[in-house]
Image: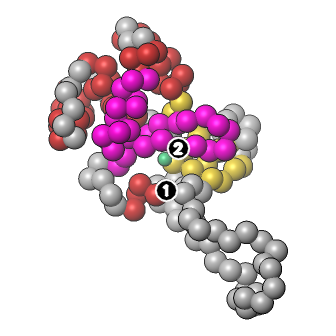
Amino acid sequence: MGRGTPATNEAVRQRIRGAGLRCTAARVAVMHHLETASGPLTHAEVAEALHDFGFDRATIYRNLIELTEAKLAARVELGDHVWRFEAKRAGGGHKGDDHPHFVCTACGEVSCLDDVQVAITPRPGKSRSRTGPSPGKTIAAVTEVLLKGRCERCE
Ligand SMILES: [Zn+2]
Ligand SMILES: [Zn+2]
């Protein structure tokens, strides 16, 4: 794993500086860890992974929040009332930020589906007449798309 190579860390530092934050060791480590993860991570997972670097849980949490407020990271809630954090894609604002997530119901691993787009379309044949109360809920905005199933390893 190319963890902590100077080149990657320099790119991470530039993003942090670009957002107007100082490059503390903990902040760089947290951001780098999020950027190299394959999916969103909980505070506990990040704290555990960076434990060997000597950062305590409170420091990790504060940095996750700061990175989120600086829009370098995003918080994802997948229905289990646990916040997960992930790095916003470099470049920012492109459609990769609105990607669906996949949860493996066997091992619980969450991954980002960067190359997948989920579209919600009305079922064919359903009339869009406005007479009478609609049995379903009308969606105002979809903020998170979550797919569940089994990952390759658990198949
Ligand atoms: Zn799995
Ligand atoms: Zn994601």
- Where does label 1 land, which residue? 99
Q: How far apart are marks 2 and 1 (CA)?
A: 11 Å
Mark nearest the camera among 2 and 1 is 2
- Where does label 2 land, which residue? 76
Decide: few, some or many residues near mark 2? Use Cα within 10 Å; few <14, some 14-19, many ≥20.
some
Q: Earlier in the sequence, mark 2 or mark 1?
A: 2
- Residue type at numbered disc 1: His
Q: Quadrant of the C terminus?
A: top right
Q: Is residue 106 visible?
A: yes
Q: Which mark is residue 133?
A: none
Residue 31 relative to residue 9: left or right: right
Q: Quadrant of the N terminus?
A: top left
Residue 121's x, y, as percent?
Answer: 64, 77
Q: Is residue 45 above or below residue 51?
A: below
Q: Is mark 2 on a helix, strand or loop?
A: strand
Q: Which residue is drawn at 39% across and 24% down?
A: 62
Residue 24's x, y, as percent?
Answer: 23, 21
Q: Which colour scheme is used?
A: secondary structure
Is residue 70 part of the magenta span, yes or no? yes
Residue 37's x, y, as percent?
Answer: 44, 36
Residue 123 relative to residue 45: left or right: right
Q: Which residue is drawn at 52% across and 62% down?
A: 116
Residue 127 relative to residue 71: left or right: right
Residue 14's x, y, as percent?
Answer: 17, 37
Q: Give the range drawn in magenta.
A: 61-89
Q: Which residue is drawn at 35% across and 39% down?
A: 69
- Residue type at numbered disc 2: Val
Kindly tell me whether mark 1's CB lies below 8 Å from ligand 2. yes
Q: Is residue 35 visible?
A: no
Residue 141 relative to residue 62: left or right: right
Q: Which residue is drawn at 54% across and 22% down?
A: 44
Kindly tell me whether mark 2's CB lies below 8 Å from ligand 2. yes
